[in-house]
Image (cartoon, grey):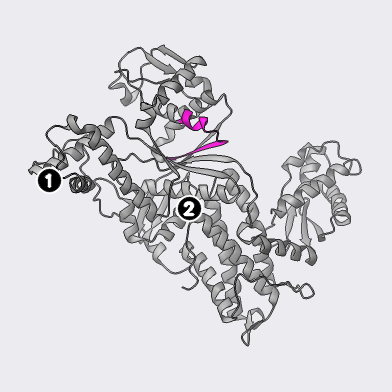
Amino acid sequence: MNIFEQYLNEIKELIINNAKKLELDNTNALKSVNLEIPPEKFDYDLSCNVAMVMAKANKKKPEHLAKNIQALLIENLKNFSKVDIAGPGFLNINFKNEALTEIINKIIKKKSNYGSNLKKNKYNLEFVSANPTGPLHVGHCRGAIFGDVLSNLLSFNGNKVTKEYYVNDHGNQIKNFVKSVFLRLREIKFNEKFKDKKELYPGDYIIDIAKKIIETKPRINLKNLDDIYNELHKLSINLSLDMIKNDLNKLGIKHDIFIFENELIKNKTVEKAVNKLKDKKFVIEGYLEEPKGEEKKDWKRIKRLIFKSSLFGDDTDRALQKNDGSWTYFASDVGYHSFKISRKFNSLINILGADHTGYIKRINAAVKALSDNKVILDCKVCQLVKLYKKGKPYKMSKRAGDFITVKDLLSEVDKDSIRFMMLSRSNDVELDFDFSKVLEKNKDNQVFYVQYCYARINSLFRILKLDLNKTFTIDEKNFNLNIYERKILRKVFDWSKTIDLASFKQEPHRITFYLYDLATLFHSYWSKGNEDEDYKLVKDGKIKQLNSLIIIQLVAIVIENGMKILGVSLPKKM
């Protein structure tokens, strides 16, 4: 239910049907027309730029065209009580009370579905996908929450979403991880000193993994790593993943499926994908140009399989084989994305960390080549998180080694605050996370402010001894909303448009912005009642205006829907 879309379509249809009367030769520009809520200083429900857009496209004066369109709207669109012209040709519109009550009744009827527009696309959303060589750190936390909330948002809007985690359990990093666990096992069993080498993982969590292995396999043979590598690999990866899943669970995140790189390689998924690209003439056997900078250090002029990714917008062609002939990390990713494509998703979304920006062009090129440009891959990069306390950089314990873990973060701040604040800015800009602010109980703490709004609404209904979920009948005869109620109602109408825009642009931070603005309008209304008797909601234990109660009920409906998307709780008392 999107009233902006509904009435914009009616306005466009009216313009097309009356193009001759309006002396319009070009109606193509209608695609650039929009309908929105005007700034607060204008006391109107809607604002449309149709006169300005069409005047420019048809070389006419916008003021003159605006007058003709104004007359057309008043005559034909019966739900409009007023259409005024402002500035260079904006049309500002107010609804009739009958139309407002009809819209309100529809919202109340939809309740938990209000805002959903049933798009029905099939998404694969891959996020976190941290190497299973250690616990999640704060950087992972932002991407994890962004991915989870984006999944919730797309699902709320009627799409089918698969939340996926790709486990990189193959390669040199994993070998070093398993070796680190092996050496910790020998340290525990035989009191051997752990070798402090650059390639090994020194964090205390490796000791935890080793202890758990000893608990389940007390007689494990530790004479030679090669003899038990496969067994130890499986045990170590599973325990590390359990640790990661536990952290994710505490953040309120659960993936639908885990895909293991090792399994893809065993099933020759990579080889099949490379052969597919060979058949399309996108893979050749040849030599790469000598790289620049630090990449040059281990480079050798060796003949290898090369993907012609420059044909699909990449800066250069990419190697699919290392010097020893084994698959590169990129080749494994090509195989993985070929597997994704085979599962018939309309759209693929990868949530990446700030250090993976250079990866985007090559994997986009692979998806285009593999799918004949039929599958869309959208890579969203989550920038760094900087931790502060009272405005100063804050360092917590580093039990994991050289980074701050999600576990550390959760020991300082609750899940709700983390989830909300990680979406307090767009994912493509750095985020300052100040512990002091998220622990305060005031307007600066955004999640508290929204939760407090909902708690206040519940307290009002408790005072009135009414059920918040009860359906009330609008008093149409006395439908006289005050200025605060009008502002709140217009913001409620904007919810469906916010959902559409946030889904289309894949920007879940728009939900936090919207909820904070809505809560701010409500708190202003509540405070005005404490200052001015005319704005008091309750008198002698009864609601002064039933319509006021319904407007507040609409706020509760939207906040419930919004916080459900964010995965943030809504306490009824605070």
Residue 505 magenta-drawn? Answer: no
Q: Is residue 418 left or right of residue 465?
A: left
Give SS at disc 1: helix
- Across and down, in percent, residue 370 comes to 51, 24
Count of marks, rendered view: 2
> In the image, what residue type sits under mark 1?
Ile
- Across and down, in percent, residue 12 comes to 80, 45
Q: Is residue 368 left or right of residue 353?
A: right
Quarter of the image with the N terminus is bottom right
Q: Which residues are magenta?
A: 337-352
- Which circle marks residue 7 in the picture? none
Quick check: marks 1 and 2 in contact, CB under 8 Å?
no
Choose between 472 and 427: the one closer to the eye.
Answer: 472
> In the image, what residue type sits under mark 2?
Leu
Sequence order check, earlier mark of 1 and 2 = 1
- Which circle marks residue 188 in the picture? 1
- Across and down, in percent, residue 450 comes to 52, 65
Is residue 259 placed above or below 514 in the rendered structure? above
Q: Residue at left 42%, top 26%?
A: 269
Residue indicated by mark 2 = 423
| Residue 306 visible (yes or no) | yes
